[in-house]
Each structure stands twice: as C-alpha cells, then as structure tokens.
Image (cartoon, rainbow, N blue to C red):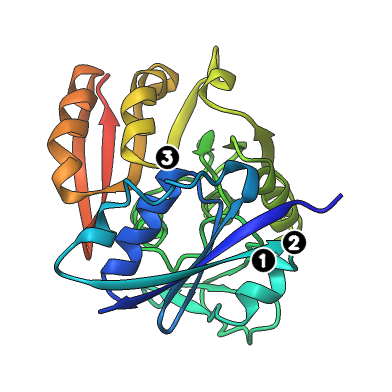
Amino acid sequence: MNTIYNGFTFVVEPRDPATEILIAELGYAGFESFVENETGVIAYIQKDDCSDDILENIFVLNSNEFSIEYKKEEIEQVNWNSEWEKNFSPIQVEDKVSIRAPFHENPNLEYDIIIEPKMSFGTGHHETTHMMVQHLLDIDVKGKKTLDMGCGTGILAIFAEMKGAMPIDAIDIDNWCYLNTIENVERNNCAKITSYEGDASLLEGKKYDLIIANINRNILLNDLEVYATCLTNGGTLLLSGFYAEDIPLLDEKARTEGLSLQNEKKRNKWVSLRYLKNA
C-alpha cells in the first residue's frame, strides 16, 4: 500500500536566506523531504503525521522580513528521484570536491561524490553539509575510526572514506536515510562504511577518533554527552545544523564535556564547529 503524503509548495521572497530557515524549521516540525527550486521549496510530510496546526510554530512564516506563500496538496508515494532531478544541480566545494548525480558530467576534481538523495537530506547544497565537507578537507582523517551521526544520504561518511577514514559507522534514525545511505555507499564503491538505523543509544560502548554530527541544535545538546564519551582522547568532533546565535549554548555544553573549540565556519546564518577532546 502506497504511503500518502502532503506536499506543501512554498513560494519565498526573497528566496535566500529565508528558504534555508524555512527548511530547518519544517524539519524540526517533522517534514521528511525537501526539493528546492527557483521560487522556494516543496516540503513533504506523511499525511498521518500532518496535523491541522503543523505550520503554527513555523516562525519564519510570520516574519516581516520575508513574503512566504504556500499551497498544500495530497499525493501518493512519488518517484522521489524524478522530483529532485528536476532541481538538483551539481556543486563543487573548494574546487576539490564535486557532488553530483549519476547523470551529471564528472568535472574530474580530486574527489567525486555521486549522490541520489531520494528523500534523504544532504546533497551538499545546504550550508551545513557544505561546511562539514570543508572541515573534512581541513583535517587529516586517514585511518581514523569515524562516526557519521544523522548521516542522511551518507555523503559525509562517503567523503570521509575517500579521505582515508576507516572503519566508519553511518547512523540515522530515519529508515529512508538508512536505506539511501546503503545505496549511495555502494554507488561510490565504498567498502569501509557500515550503515545503521537508530539513534544515539546505538553508541553505547563505542569509541571513535572522529565524530561528525550534522543534525539540529536540540538533538546535539541532548546527545553531546554521549558523543564526548565515545570520542577518544585527542579526537575530533564536527558539529553543524544550527545558527550562529546557538553557539554559546552549544559551546557551554561542549566545554562541560571536556571539549575545546578549534575552528568555526559560517555560511549565511548557519554555523559549523570543530572541537577537540582534551587528553
């Protein structure tokens, strides 16, 4: 039986950065998938999860800085590949990393990542994924046991393996993301990544040299203690999925867990932080 979805088409003016803020807030509210286009974004949520007041706490809709209009339609399970193919264009990071779909031409950069996101999050277009790729470019990950928490499409785990990290665990609570990660891992001929469906409870007794967590502020705050416990002394923690104004709250929590801030990246209103676990 096909799952019924509600699709919300948002027309956003000006498009940036309002679209990114909107996607983040809709993600917190339970929307599963987003297809960005020239006028805004189409957001999808299962009909059973879509209450009448689902948009009540989407604060950007009431902002005086932006004009956002939307329409809602009910749809059956769609071909998500064809949906994002209409709008997904290849990108490059630092002229070293290409992130593209299989039908895009290979620009022959140092690293070439092929992603079919389906309903998963993380194509490199979003600021948080882009900054995490930049962090991974900056550091030596060769031979480091790695965790990609909230892996989405698996893009960051895949890039970590390309840079020599091993072995790698990729975990996401969403079944679509778990399955999509497996597909993308195979598509990129990765052999060091194991995908799991679940949350931070899977980390009990685990140890990692590098932890990548691109999720959202609330989950990061809740799970930071677990990440710090799992991180080896001298290990690296990469965080993203939040705004600049969230830094003091996250940094205070990180410092209480024995983590020291090493680097900070900003892209529009989004932020990514790199921490070191003190020996």
State the residue at coordinates (33%, 46%).
240
Left-right relation of 243 to 147 = left
- According to the picture, the residue beneath numbered tag 2 turns out to be 76
Given residues 174 and 49, the one toward you in this image is 49
N-terminal-most mark, 3 or 2:
2
Q: Looking at numbered disc 3 in the image, what kind of residue is underneath it?
A: Ala
Calculate the distance from the C-alpha at mark 1 to the C-alpha at mark 3: 21 Å
Q: Looking at numbered disc 2 in the image, what kind of residue is underneath it?
A: Glu
Q: Position of residue 174 (x, y in %)?
A: 62, 40
- According to the picture, the residue beneath numbered tag 3 turns out to be 213
State the residue at coordinates (67%, 33%).
196
User: The residue tagged with tag 1: helix, strand or loop?
Assistant: loop
State the residue at coordinates (65%, 74%).
83
For residue 118, which quarter of the picture?
bottom right
Q: Quadrant of the C terminus?
A: top left
Residue at the extreme front of the image, as rendered = 52
Left-right relation of 119 to 257 = right
State the residue at coordinates (52%, 78%).
109
**Mark 1 or 2, closer to the camera:** 2
N-terminal-most mark, 1 or 2:
2
Q: Position of residue 210 (x, y in %)?
A: 44, 35
Residue 116: numbered disc:
1
Calculate the distance from the C-alpha at mark 1 to the C-alpha at mark 2: 20 Å
Calculate the distance from the C-alpha at mark 3 to the C-alpha at mark 2: 32 Å
